[in-house]
Amino acid sequence: MSNSSLVCSVDSGQMPKKLYAVAAEFANPTALYEAAEKVRDHGFRWWDCYTPYAIHGLDKAMGLKKSWVPILTLIGGIHGLVIGFLLITITSVYVYPIDTQGKPYFSLPAFVPILDLLTIMLAAIFTLKGIIVLSWLPRLHHPLWEWDLFTRATHDKFFVVIEAKDPRFDEKNTATLLQEIGGTNLTFIGEEE
Amino acid sequence: MSYFTPSTVPADPLNRHESLEIARARQELIREPLVNNERSAAWVGDHIASVVENPTPLWWYIAVSIAGGVASLAGICILYLITTGVGVWGENKAANWAWDITNFVFWIGIGHAGTMIAAILYLTRQRWASGINRAAEAMTIFAVMCAGVFPAVHVGRVWMAWYMAPIPNGNAIWPNFRSPLLWDVFAVNTYLGASIMFWYVGLIPDAAAMRDRIKNKILKYVYAIICLGWRGSARQWSNYESGYLMLAGIATLLVITTCTVVSSDFSTSVIPGWHGTIFIPYFGVGAIYGGFCMLIILLVPIRQYYKLQDIVTLRHIDLCCRYTLLMGLFVTYIYGMEFFIAYYSGSPNERFTFTDRIFGPYWFTWDLMMIFNCVIPQLFWSKKVRRCPWLAFTIVLFPSIGMWLERYVIIVSSIHRDFLPSSWGMFYPTYIDVLTFTGTFGIFFLMYLLFIRFLPVIAIAEVRSVLPEANPHQPPVVVDSNAGGTHE
C-alpha cells in the first residue's frame, strides 16, 4: 500500500522524514544496463537494480563481484564428505563391525555411493542456504514495498535504486543523475524511523 | 515474423550482395524462436499467472475427485498390507521381488527425466528447456514420492524401517553401509531432497511475481512466505544464478548416482540376468526414456487446455519426441547387447535366463516390451508425427507401458526360474498389487493437479530471460516474415 509520508515523487518537492533511497524506472533491459554502467562509474556502492528476470551481464555492468554461493557449495560438499566418512568408518569399523562376504571392515569402494550421496546432499543444502542468506533473505518487509509501482519490479518494470546511506548520495544531485541517465518516475523512498 | 540475433545472421537475410542460395541457406540457419508470436515478457507473466488466477474450472474439481479417489486406493491397500503382512502381494519363494520393485524402478525412472531436463539441459545451455523445466521438475518430485511408497512398505515390518537410518538405537545396531539396499535408502532420500531444493530455488522469483499480482489475500500471503521476500535485485539475481548453476551441477551428479545405485540393487547380486555391468547405463537411459514419455503425456493436455502453445511450442514437443526416440534407440541397443553378452559369456544359466525371457511363460511381456519400446517410437523419425502433439501423446503411451514391462521382465523373468529347477515358480499379481500400483497413479496425478492449480506451471522468470527483449546487448530486430520456420 502506498504511504504518502513514505513515498514522494521527486517532482512534488516533498521528502520523507527519513530517506531510504531514491528510485527511478527504466524502460527496458538495454536502458537499465547502460544506466547501471553509469551509476557504477560514478562510484556508488549502496545501490541496486531491480529486474523481473536475470539480465545477462548486469552484474558486470554494476561492478558486482562474483557470488560467494559456489564457495558455500564447496564447503557444504566437504562437510558432507567428512561427516559421511566419519559416520561410516566409525560405525562399520569400530562400533558395529559386520563381516560381509569376508570384506575388510574398512572397505572404501563399497562406501563410495553413500559418501557421494551425503556430499551431494550437504552441498545442495548449503547452496540453498547460500542463495537465501547471501541475498539477505528471508525478509518480511522492505521500504521499497511501500511504493505501488514497485510491485511491477517482478512483472515488467526495471528500477535503479540508490540508497541514502551511500557516501556519495546527495538528495538533489543523485536524483538529477538518475534523470540524466534516462530514469523516469523518480521517487524518494522513506523508511520508518 | 520472428526475432533473431544480428550477430549470427545479418538483419537483412535477402542481402542483395549475396546469391539467392546463400540467402536461403541463411534462412534455414535461423532458429525457431523459443517463444512464438513475439510475445513480450509481460504477456508471458500474465498468461502463465492466469492459469492460477482464473477461477477454478469445473473439470479440475472432477479430476481431483477422481485422482483423490484412486489415490485413496493406495492408502487402503497399504494399510491392509501393513496390518496383514506382505503376503497380501503375489510374491512367493521363487519371485520374491515383483511388482513392488518394478513399480519403484518405474516411478524413480520417471523422476530422472525431470532432473535431466532441468539440470543437464540447463548446464548444456539448451535454452528451450526453460519452457518445460518447471513441469518436468514437479513431475520428478511427485514421481519420487510415488516411488518411495514401495520400498518403504515392502520391508514387511514397516515400523522397523527406521533401522535403516544411521541413528543410535537401543540395540546398538548400525546399518550395513556396504549394502546396495542401504545405498538405495540414501539415494532416494537425497534425490527427493535435492530435487525439492532445486525446484524450490526456481520457484522463488515466480512466487514473488505471484505475490505482487494476485488479488486473493490468502494466496498472496502464502506466496509471500514461499518467496521469502524476494525483490529481484541484481545482487539477489547474481546469487540466485550462480546457486542455480551449482544446484544444476549437483542434480546432474545425483541423477547419475541414483540410477547407478538403483541398478546396483540388481547388478551386485549374482542372479543371471541381473549380474551385468551394463545395468548402470541401462537404468539411466531407461529412466530418461520413461520420463520423457510421461512429460509429453503431461505437457500436451496442459498446453492445449491453458493455451500455452506459444511457450510450450511445437518445437518443444518435437525436441521431447526426439529425445524419446534417441533413448528408445539406446534401450534397443542395450536389449540387443544383453542378449549378445548372455550368449558370449558361455554361462549356461545366463543363456537360459535370456532364452526363458523370449520362450518362457512370460514371453508375452517380453514381446510387448519389444514392440512398445523399440518398434512404436520409430514413428518419431517423421517430423509430421513429432509436430502433431496428440499423435505424439498417443504414441508415448506405449513406451510408458513398455518401460514398466521392461522392469517387470528384468525382475520377474530373471528370478522366477533360478539355478535349481526344484525352486522354480510363477508370479501372479494379486488384486492388492494391482490396486496399490493404480493408487500411486492417483497420488501422482492428484499432486500434479494441485501443482497446476496453485503454482506457475512454467518458470516465468526463466522464460522471460530467454526472450530476445531480455538481451541488453542485442536489441531485437524484426525480420522478413518468411524467415524462421513454422509457427502455430
Image (cartoon, grey):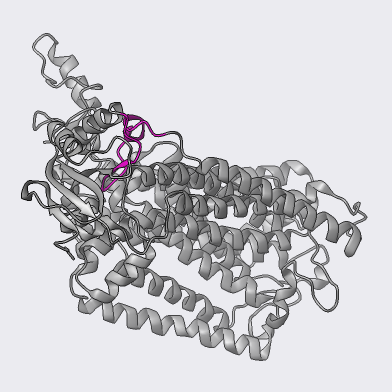
Which quarter of the rendered picture does the N terminus of chain B lie within?
Answer: top left
Residue nearest the observer in this picture, B308 or A144: A144
For image coordinates 68% across by 81% down, the residue present is B158
- Classify residue B484 by image quadrant: top left
The correct choice, above or below, for B225 with respect to B111 in the image is below
For image coordinates 29% across by 34% down, the residue present is A168
Specify the principal SS of the magenta part.
loop
Residue A9 in percent (x, y) is at 11, 51
The correct choice, above or below, for B324 with respect to B73 in the image is above
Q: How many numbered marks appear? A: 0
Residue A53 in percent (x, y) is at 29, 46
| Residue B360 in sight | no
The correct choice, above or below, for B158 with respect to B342 in the image is below
Residue nearest the observer in this picture, B397 or A96: A96
Judge from the rendering whether residue B420 lies leftward or rightward of residue B391; answer left or right: right
Residue A14 in percent (x, y) is at 11, 52
Residue nearest the observer in this picture, B183 or A142: A142
The correct choice, above or below, for A178 with respect to B99 in the image is above
Judge from the rendering whether residue B376 lies leftward or rightward of residue B344; answer left or right: left
Residue nearest the observer in this picture, A130 or A106: A130
User: Magenta residues?
Assistant: A43-64
Q: Is residue B226 magenta?
A: no
Q: Is residue A63 magenta?
A: yes
**Residue at the extreme left:** A12
**Residue at the extreme top:** B17
Judge from the rendering whether residue B191 lies leftward or rightward of residue A183; answer left or right: right
For image coordinates 8% across by 33% down, the residue present is B481
| Residue A190 in sight | yes
Residue B226 in percent (x, y) is at 38, 65
